[in-house]
Amino acid sequence: FVDEDTCATNFMIRDDKMMELVAPHKEPITPFIHKVRSLYKQHGVSTILVIGGSGDYFQVADHVLMMDSYACLDVTDKAKAIVERHNGIKSAATSNEPSSSSFGTITNRYPIGNAFLPPPNNSKINVRARTIVTYGDGLELDLGGLEQIVHKSQTHAIASSIQQIATRLLSNDPSANGGNATTLTLATVLRRWNELIDMEGLDVVLSSSFNNGGDGDYNGVHARPRMLEIAGAMNRLRRDGTFRQNPR
C-alpha cells in the first residue's frame, strides 16, 4: 500500500524536464513508477496506490478505481483510453530510466546485536507514546512513519522484541561474537522471531531484565505487532553500527 501524500515526490515520479536537468545516473532514487511492474512480475508483490496527482501511473496500472461522491467506481477502461489518446507523448512511465524493465537486486542487511540494546550503564528503554521510544542514552526512536501501529501496546511489544532479538537471536549466533557481528540477515532474524512467537506465544517478548515502559505489570501492556513494524523500527534506530551490508 502506497499513499502519495506520505511519499517523497522523487520517489513517486520524475518528469522529463527534471530528468533532462538531473541525469538519471546522478539521481540515487529510481522512481517507483519504473519499478512497480517489475516488482509484481519478478517478486509477486502487487501494489495498491492512492494517488491524485499524476496520471502517468495509468499506463502501468492493472485496475484504476476512482472515488466519486463517496462511491467507488471502476474507471480502468476510461484511464486506459486516456493513455491511448496521449500515446506518443513522453511521460514519466515511458522515459528512459535505467533498469526500468528489471526490479534489480535486493541488498541484504545484517543487524548487529549490541547496537539494538541500550548502553550498559543505563538499561532503561521507555515507551513514551505510541510513536516514541526513548533509549537510555537519550536516543529517541521515532515510529511516526509506521502508520499501521495503532496502539501503544504494539509499541511496547516492538521495543521488547528488538531487545530480545538482540540477545536471543543475534548474540546466540556462533559468529555473533557477543552481538558485535552476525551472519543473519534482517529477513532471517525476523522470520525466526516470528516463529518463536508462534511457538511460545507473546510471552516470548517479555523478560524481567527489560524495561516494560513504565506501565507497571506486563499484563495487557503488549499486543503482537507485525514483523514489518519491527523491521521498520530497527531501520529507524539512528545509531552508528546498527547494520552492515556484508556478513562477518
Image (cartoon, grey):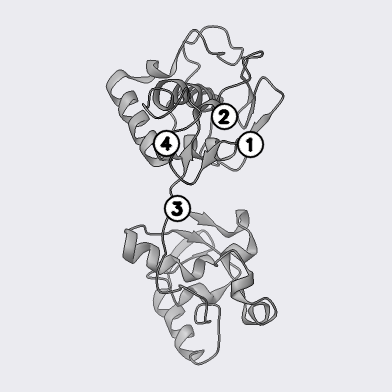
Q: Identify whether 104 is placed above or below 150.
A: below
| Mark 3 and mark 4: Cα distance apart in space | 19 Å
Q: Which residue is mark 2?
A: 115
Q: Which residue is mark 3?
A: 107
Residue 94 location (% of width, % of height): 50, 82
- Horizontal arrangement in the rendering, residue 227 relative to residue 198 (left or right): right
| Mark 2 and mark 1: Cα distance apart in space | 8 Å
Between 158 and 1, the one lying in front of the other is 158
Q: Which residue is mark 1?
A: 240
Query: Which sits earlier in the primary sequence, circle 2 or circle 1?
Result: 2
Q: Are marks 2 and 1 in contact (CB under 8 Å)?
A: yes
Q: Residue placed at 57% from the left, 29% from the top? A: 115
| Mark 2 and mark 4: Cα distance apart in space | 19 Å
Query: Which sits earlier in the primary sequence, circle 2 or circle 4?
Result: 2
Residue 146 location (% of width, % of height): 55, 41
Q: Could you tell me which secondary element the residue under label 4 belongs to?
A: helix
Query: Which sits earlier in the primary sequence, circle 2 or circle 3?
Result: 3
